[in-house]
Image: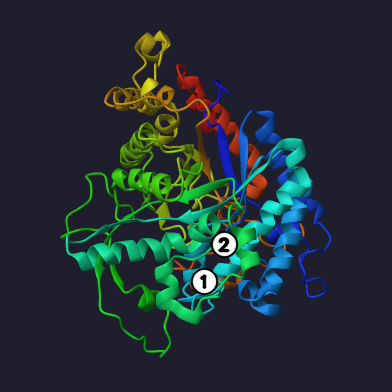
Amino acid sequence: MSDIGLEAYRFSISWSRLLSCTLFNINGRGAINPKGLQYYNGLIDELVSNGIQPHVTLYHLDHPQILEEEYAGWLSPKFIEDFTAFADVCFREFGDRVAHWTTVNEPNIMCLGSYNSGQTAPRQCSSHPGGKQLINVNCNGREGVVKMHRAKQKGLIGLSVYAFWCTPMTNSNADMEATQRATDFYTGWALNPLVFGDYPKIMKKNVGSRIPSFTKRESELVKGSFDFIGLNHYYTAYIQDIPQTTPKTGRGDFNSDMNVKFSLTKDDTPPGPFAASSTLYNPSGLQSVLLYFKDYYGNPPVYIQENGFGGSHNETLNDTGRIHYVNGYMGGILDAIRSGSNARGYFVWSFLDVFEILSGYQTRYGLVHVDFEEKDLKRRPKLSAQWVLVNSSVDVQVEGTVAEDGRTPGIWDVYTYDVIGLAQTNPNFSRDEFPSNFVFGAGTAAYQVEGAVAEDGRTPSIWDIYTHKGLMPDKSTGDIASDGYHKYKVLFILIFWFPQGNGASLLCYISIIYF
């Protein structure tokens, strides 16, 4: 482990690729697609054989389109049965090598974007939709882990929640109450049932009968049905109270029930010197979320599963903004740990540039640049790829041959020395200061990285339908994405060439570029 850069890799499994879901087989229990099984087995085997922990998400915003057409997806109780069957296949086939399972990625945001506002796939509109379904799925998933392989491998299961850090815009009582209300609606909606067995009181009061209630039995089953919490965090939100209003539709919805105004900046002041147009910088927000989880939810184990810097589509390899961003947030995590947080890991989003759900290819989050204009989608490591995983303990020994015999410094000489300079400007902490069981990794998701949407038995997902209607801002699709389906072994070459601790050389980077 000391000789490789990544300790863990987070990815999701495409339901549409693993199982053959057709008009004649719509229940999610059908035959396993052998090509899909081969792909995920190969991916997991490569990880395990090289000492990298696989962290698997079962549902990352996509499911087979046929389930949407048959019974409206998450809006139907049938979905729980079908998802549970899909999860059982994953536990059975991969559970001997995968110890960390996340049932659903960002159920709170997925419910809002996909089933409340209808802005993202599958574009359904409902009042407080799917939340109970998602929580029950997590409960069923945990039972599946226990039944399938916990005795053999001690597998762990969790739910990933998107969490803003909410802070009052002013010191008024109204804004402070609105801030707690926003936290309860966004975060408590997903986490309170898992920890306390029911929704936040303010949600039940404001929403009333429009939010499905838990029976006593359901509450008992749901409460404690997790081993860890996955946390996705990008923004601090400034909260203002607003008067209660009735939407034009005549029925209440999430926003009218919550009655707050969100702002990502305060008084139009930029939140930090390294903020890109798509990424605001406030590391204390992540630290505050972790401490809130500690104090309010009993300090559960937390993996920060997503946090990252979105650069523009023409971002260069010299992504110093991302380095400063991740440096700041890692420092915030360490400060939270020093204050008692049970944070267990940090996954940068994302390892590669990928198809982004909200912006297509207009925004780049990767540590590794993917040239989407080239047919072979050439990969090139950005400056952050070296720094993020090496941190301030870099000790680069540059051989004397670099500038011997009159040879002038080239681009990679400059690149290497830039890393040294950046490392030396950050003496605040090192990886050794994190707990020994804390893991550093990076993540991707199936639809966003794999491509090959019509190959080897994969059937259409809801995002295939959505993007093919031209609904993305740049009219793009994930048909090819980063071509992770065909190039996953190149991914490992990149991972293994990133040095850790006290090793880095020009040969390392030449090898990366070659591959």
* Relative horizontal placement of residue 215, taking residue 260 as reference (left or right): right
At x 78% / y 52%, what residue is drawn?
A: 35
* Relative horizontal placement of residue 286, taking residue 63 as reference (left or right): left
At x 77% / y 54%, what residue is drawn?
A: 89
- Disc 2 element: loop
Where residue 448 sits in the image (x, y, percent)? 55, 55
Q: Badges 1 and 2: C-beta atoms under 8 Å apart?
A: yes
Q: Is residue 80 above or below residue 496?
A: below
Q: Is residue 203 visible?
A: yes
Tell which residue pokes out farthest to the front in this image: 216
Q: Is residue 325 above or below residue 189?
A: above
Is disc 1 surrounded by few (<14), some (14 to 19) or many (20+) residues within 10 Å?
A: many
Q: Along the polypeptide, which appears first: circle 1 or circle 2?
A: 2
Quarter occupied by the N terminus: top right
Is disc 2 surrounded by few (<14), some (14 to 19) or many (20+) residues within 10 Å?
A: many
Q: List the residue tagged with mark 1.
A: 114
Which quarter of the picture shows residue 410?
Answer: top left
* Amino acid beneath label 2: Leu
* Relative horizontal placement of residue 380, taking residue 38 as reference (left or right): left
* Relative horizontal placement of residue 110, taking residue 425 as reference (left or right): right
Numbered circles on residues, count: 2
Where residue 198 sits in the image (x, y, percent)? 52, 64
Q: Is residue 350 visible?
A: no
Quarter occupied by the C terminus: top right
Task: Report the Cα–Cα distance between label 1 and label 2.
Answer: 9 Å
In the image, 331 versus 278, the foreground residue is 331
Q: List the residue tagged with mark 2.
A: 61
Q: Is residue 492 above or below residue 236?
A: above
* Amino acid beneath label 1: Ser
In the image, 457 versus 163, the foreground residue is 163
